[in-house]
């Protein structure tokens, strides 16, 4: 049985917490690399619906300080025009100031997409991911802590990957997002996306989150931590434990954490770990030690 580390830091001072948690990873691996960055800009609603601009800035500046060959944020929004949303949330301005690129996935041509077909998928026609992500040397994802009222049940790192999948591909008359959101297999389909691109770092900004509703609005709760790791399944399992500690929807609260569809399917197909026992929590301060203890209890009893 393998073990994956999940780091937890106090988010009372967001930038301090992010700096502490990023210091736990070997960021020199980004030197000379083509780096793809996926944040959470599904709508123009403010954090915790969308990635906090300070979170994006600290992550981007940390990567850029290692002299990568390129850093490109790739995004497709589901609730509005992607470019307008990125403009409204300050992402375009930040990219120009910090020195990274932005690719609006709705605007790329057919040659920019990689078709994904594989036996056993719950996608009837497969799906498409951007080559800028599938061919990247390194991929970083930063997500939020939220429930999802449109059938995903929760949206953290696994669900954040939906914003990489094409809704429509030039030359193909088919709406892939319509299939996803009307399928009884939606949560398994979400998990399956993650099998086809790598992640080298996942940062979940759980200073605040939505315990009901989501992804754009909901009941705000304040776990007060930053969570990070390299394993999407582990990070999401910790996120579920955090939401259960605040009280959340029936779909999030009931059953074993590793029995929830997104997590179970992702573990089944090798996206990440297969059990809560494989998560080693690494708190970085006194506040996160308290949170880690509560999360560990939930993982041990409900994982």
Image (tube, rainbow, N blue to C red):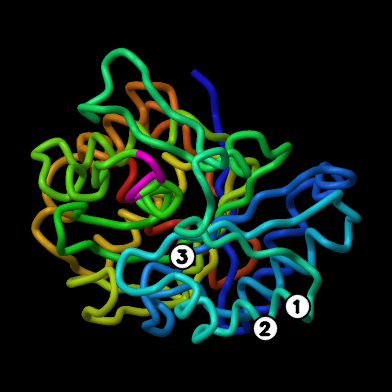
Q: Position of residue 240 (x, y in %)?
A: 31, 54
Q: Secondary structure at mark 2?
A: helix
Q: Secondary structure at mark 3?
A: loop
Of badges 3 and 1, the one in the foreground is 1
Task: Name the residue tied to disc 3.
Answer: 40
Q: Farthest top residue? A: 119
Residue contact between numbered discs 1 and 2, judged by CB atoms under 8 Å: yes
Q: Is residue 226 above or below residue 238?
A: below
Task: Work out whether mark 3 precedes mark 1 in sequence or the reverse, and give the earlier one.
Answer: 3
Task: Name the residue tied to disc 2.
Answer: 93
Stretch in magenta? 167-171
Q: Position of residue 44 (x, y in %)?
A: 39, 81
Residue ID at (43%, 36%) = 194
Q: Main secondary structure of the magenta part?
A: loop
Quarter of the image holding residue 60? bottom right
Q: Is residue 38 magenta?
A: no
Q: Is residue 225 above or below residue 295?
A: below
Residue ID at (80%, 50%) = 27
Residue 34 visible in the current orientation = yes
Q: Is residue 169 magenta?
A: yes
Q: Position of residue 114 (x, y in %)?
A: 50, 32
Residues at marks 2 and 3, CA–CA distance in whole angstroms: 17 Å
- Crowding around mark 2 (Cα neighbors within 10 Å: few <14, some 14 to 19, many 20+) is few
Residue ID at (26%, 43%) = 176
Task: Name the residue tied to disc 1.
Answer: 96
């Amino acid at each position: 049985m393998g073990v994956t580390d999940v780091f937890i830091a106090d988010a009372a001072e967001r930038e301090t917490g992010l700096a502490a948690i990023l210091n736990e990873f070997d960021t020199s691996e980004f030197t000379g690399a083509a780096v793809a960055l996926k944040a959470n800009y599904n709508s123009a609603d403010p954090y915790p619906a969308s990635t906090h601009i300070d979170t994006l800035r600290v992550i981007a500046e940390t990567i850029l300080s290692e002299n990568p060959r390129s850093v490109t944020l790739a995004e497709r929004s589901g609730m509005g025009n992607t470019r307008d949303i990125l403009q409204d949330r300050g992402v375009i301005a930040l990219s120009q100031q910090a020195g990274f690129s932005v690719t609006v996935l709705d605007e790329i041509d057919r040659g920019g997409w990689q078709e994904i077909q594989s036996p056993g998928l719950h996608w009837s026609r497969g799906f498409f991911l951007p080559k800028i992500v599938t061919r990247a040397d390194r991929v970083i994802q930063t997500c939020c802590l939220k429930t999802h009222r449109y059938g995903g049940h929760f949206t953290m790192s696994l669900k954040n990957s939906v914003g990489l999948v094409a809704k429509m591909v030039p030359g193909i008359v088919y709406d892939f997002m319509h299939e996803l959101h009307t399928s009884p297999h939606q949560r398994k389909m979400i998990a399956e996306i993650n099998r086809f691109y790598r992640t080298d770092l996942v940062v979940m900004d759980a200073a605040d989150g939505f315990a009901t509703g989501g992804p754009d609005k909901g009941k705000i709760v304040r776990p007060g931590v930053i969570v990070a790791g390299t394993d999407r399944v582990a990070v999401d399992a910790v996120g579920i434990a955090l939401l259960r500690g605040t009280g959340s929807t029936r779909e999030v609260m009931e059953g074993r954490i590793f029995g929830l569809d997104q997590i179970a399917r992702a573990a089944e197909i090798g996206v990440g770990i297969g059990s809560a026992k494989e998560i080693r929590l690494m708190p970085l301060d006194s506040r996160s030690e308290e949170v880690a203890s509560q999360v560990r209890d939930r993982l041990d009893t409900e994982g």
